[in-house]
Image (spheres, rainbow, N blue to C red):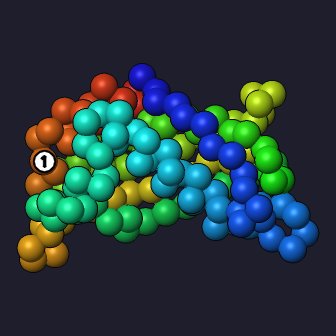
Amino acid sequence: MEFACEVVVRLYDTDAAGFHFFGAQFRFAHEALEEFVAHIGQPIGKTIRDREVLFPVVHAEADYRAPLSVGDRLTVRVVVRALGDRSFSMGYRLLLADGREAGSVMTVHASVSGATGAACPLPEQVRAGFAPYLATGD
């Protein structure tokens, strides 16, 4: 199963040439992650305020396939690529209105104790929320 949300390329997402700045693609992915975790009942604001377990990004990569300009509307399709004992990986496909893939992002998140910063087991409620979105193949 996939989760999908919409994002819009804003002026601050672009560079002097008028195309999206490479770092904006990570912002689009993170915006989709925030929408996704809210959808599964784990809103990011509550997670941060509670500080019991946090999920920092420990690895990120992106591929760029089409230029984006201010006002472009994208559908971001989100899947869980992997669920480990103390981490998870997310995949994001950025699709233009005509269905072409503008790019993709992959992030790996560690599960860490908010009190100590040490790695800790992925909470069961997070695992249960992510499980239906676990990709079964590429």
| Residue 101 in the image, given as x and y percentages of width and height | 72, 38
Quarter of the picture holding the N terminus: top left
Q: Quadrant for residue 48, please give it.
A: bottom left
Residue plotted at (41% across, 31% down) = 135
Q: Nearer the viewer, residue 85 or 123?
A: 123
Residue at 76% x, 62% y: name it: 11
Residue lying furthest top: 1
Q: Is residue 45 left or right of residue 90?
A: left
Indicate the amino acid at tag 1: Pro
The residue singled out by tag 1 in the image is 123
- Judging depth in this view, the residue of 72 and 3 nearest the camera is 72
In the shown orientation, is residue 24 left or right of residue 19? left
Q: Is residue 80 left or right of residue 102?
A: left
Q: How many marks?
A: 1
Q: Taking the image as drawn, is residue 137 in sight?
A: no
Q: Position of residue 93 (x, y in %)?
A: 60, 40
Location of residue 77 with respect to 82 vertically, above or below: above
When asked about the image quadrant of residue 83, the answer is: top left
Would you call the spot at circle 1 few (<14 residues within 10 Å), some (14-19), or many (20 or more)?
A: few
In front of the other: 131 or 21: 21
Note whether residue 6 is visible.
yes
Q: Residue at x 43, y 47 (%)?
A: 33
Q: Secondary structure at mark 1?
A: loop
- Expressed as whole percent of the image width and height from the top left, the position of residue 97 reads 77, 30
